[in-house]
Image: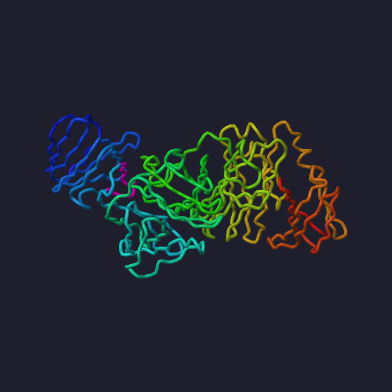
């Protein structure tokens, strides 16, 4: 078997390599008459490319892991599922872009595992075939399917005859270090319509149906109707969900969704539609994610604890709203052993990516952090594009009454207690022309005689929702008030409380001791 590096121009010739008989016709038309040939073409931006390829009845073509092959015309395989093999290994998976229907092949899928069942080392998987498989094809693994009606994962059970759909994604856990599965059948090609949940705000776990990556940003490759603009993928390394919103991605997610990778989409309304065609297909070197960042103006706050990560992003976009809209990406929660970090919009949406208009005035965004353990935590701050030139960004630790200027600090370390109120942080965005201290001090609050006084000059006459929590996060009070100056709230409890004041455009958070 020959490993052949793709680095030559094909003319009309006959090649004999280790028993493989290959006829190369003009126009890069390959005919494999007999023998086994293995193709190694490791550059996604310079794939092996044929106008046509025919695999004869006594021949086979194997595309090595992390190799890339494009067949622009007709692909014919006369040797069945053993005649075309797309290999997968620890370095990545072979990628094929073709245009012929019903081509038989064997597709490999390498998966890492973990002997510790509590590790939650899951993968979201699928396979690029045009017919279902059965559970026996995933022997040794635990598998769950996503229920559109229940909106939760459901075990597929223990029967090896259970049907595994080619139109769905699955959660899979393999209780050893690694495994390579072989899937045999006819490859998907052309237009693929995927079944979705039917209700607004429902999630669906769908497959990348092709034996190549797909580009979420490919304008001619998708029909997405009544869907939000984001997709979500479980990251076993982070033990959290990564998300990409069409501009930027958290935890390494980008526009490229690898072959064999399932992903979540969310309905923005009922009667949602998701359809793909070959224009969405691409070669991408990354077998899972890559760490690239678009040239957007945004802030990243990352955290790593117990070897697991989470990340939240705040992005400026001129067409975004301050409340939840299609530019934003909901937070999907990972393992309780992993850090959970997200921002909260004024209408209460929990967001991994919060896309807002560039602040024209001082703007506050609550930030929530939780973890089911007591440990020292370090936030890492990164600002991309011209983010730091457009606003002054302050992170407020309400619990410690500290202000951290992100232009002067690239990290912040604090002691986390699992009983802390999760909403202990506030991001302050202040346009560089603002008088920042007076803006920050415009929100004044104090307590006297069991009453709480709130002075917010720019919210006088505005109806706001006022909530009070104890430091453990228990809700003590929730009332709607038309704010006067000061607004007076009768407290129901004494001691240290967290106060949240929210209208349709902003949220203010403070810590106060009520005597």
Depth check, front residue: 236 or 153 = 153
Seen as rendered, the residue at the extreme bottom is: 158
Residue drawn at x 27%, y 39% is 71
Q: Does residue 140 appear in this view?
A: yes
Is residue 285 rendered magenta in the image?
Answer: no
In the rendered image, the quadrant that contains the C terminus is bottom right
Taking 264 as reference, is 141 above or below it?
below
In the image, taking residue 313 as reference, residue 510 lies left or right, namely: right
Is residue 94 rendered magenta in the image?
Answer: yes
Instruction: Tell me where residue 236 appears, x and y as whole percent.
Output: 45, 54
Colour scheme in use: rainbow
In the image, taking residue 375 as reference, residue 149 lies left or right, namely: left
Instruction: Tell me where residue 161 appears, x and y as whole percent.
Output: 32, 68
Residue drawn at x 51%, y 64% is 150
Seen as rendered, the residue at the extreme front is: 271
- Give the image quarter of residue 466: bottom right
Q: Specify the segment rendered in magenta.
A: 86-98
The secondary structure that dominates the magenta segment is: strand
Residue drawn at x 45%, y 38% is 219
Instruction: Tell me where residue 358 appears, x and y as whole percent.
Output: 65, 36
Count of marks, rendered view? 0
């Amino acid at each position: 078997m020959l490993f052949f590096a793709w680095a030559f121009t094909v003319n009309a010739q006959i090649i004999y390599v280790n028993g493989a008989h290959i006829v190369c016709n003009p126009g890069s038309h390959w005919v494999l008459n007999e023998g086994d040939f293995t193709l190694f073409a490791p550059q996604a931006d310079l794939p092996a490319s044929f106008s046509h390829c025919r695999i004869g009845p006594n021949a086979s073509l194997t595309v090595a892991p992390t190799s890339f092959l494009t067949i622009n015309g007709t692909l014919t395989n006369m040797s069945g599922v053993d005649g075309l093999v797309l290999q997968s290994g620890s370095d990545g998976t072979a990628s094929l872009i073709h245009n012929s229907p019903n081509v038989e092949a064997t597709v490999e899928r390498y998966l890492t595992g973990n002997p510790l069942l509590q590790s939650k080392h899951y993968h979201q998987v699928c396979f690029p075939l045009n017919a279902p498989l059965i559970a026996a094809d995933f022997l040794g693994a635990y598998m769950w399917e996503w229920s559109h009606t229940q909106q939760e994962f459901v075990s597929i059970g223990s029967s090896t005859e259970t049907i595994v759909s080619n139109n769905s994604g699955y959660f899979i856990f393999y209780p050893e270090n690694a495994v390579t599965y072989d899937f045999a059948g006819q490859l998907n090609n052309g237009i693929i319509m995927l079944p979705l949940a039917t209700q607004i705000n429902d999630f669906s776990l769908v497959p990348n149906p092709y034996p190549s990556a797909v580009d979420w940003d490919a304008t001619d490759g998708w029909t997405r109707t009544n869907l939000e603009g984001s997709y979500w993928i479980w990251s076993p390394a982070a033990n959290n969900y990564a998300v990409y919103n069409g501009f930027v991605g958290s935890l390494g997610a980008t526009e490229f969704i690898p072959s064999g990778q399932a992903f979540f989409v969310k309905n923005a309304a009922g009667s949602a539609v998701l359809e793909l065609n070959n224009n969405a297909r691409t070669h991408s070197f990354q077998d899972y994610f890559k760490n690239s960042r678009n040239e957007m103006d945004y802030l990243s706050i990352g955290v790593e604890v117990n070897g697991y990560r989470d990340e939240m992003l705040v992005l400026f976009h001129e067409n975004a709203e301050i409340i939840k809209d299609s530019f934003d990406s909901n937070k999907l929660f990972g393992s309780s052993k992993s850090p959970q970090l997200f921002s909260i919009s004024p209408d209460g949406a929990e967001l991994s990516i919060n896309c807002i208009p560039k602040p024209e005035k001082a703007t506050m965004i609550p930030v929530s952090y939780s973890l089911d353990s007591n440990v020292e935590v370090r936030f890492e701050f990164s600002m991309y594009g011209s983010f730091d030139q457009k606003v002054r960004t302050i992170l407020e630790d309400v619990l410690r009454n500290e202000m951290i200027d992100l232009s002067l600090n690239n990290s912040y370390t604090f002691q986390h207690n699992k009983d802390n109120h999760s909403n202990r942080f506030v991001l302050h965005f202040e346009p560089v022309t603002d008088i920042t201290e007076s803006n920050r001090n415009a929100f004044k609050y104090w307590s006297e005689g069991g009453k709480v006084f709130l002075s917010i000059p720019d919210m006088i006459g505005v109806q706001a929702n006022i909530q009070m929590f104890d430091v453990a996060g228990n809700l003590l009070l929730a009332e709607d008030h038309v704010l006067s100056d000061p607004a007076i709230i009768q407290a129901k409890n004494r001691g240290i409380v967290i106060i949240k004041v929210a209208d349709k455009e902003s949220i203010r958070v403070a810590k106060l001791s009520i005597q």
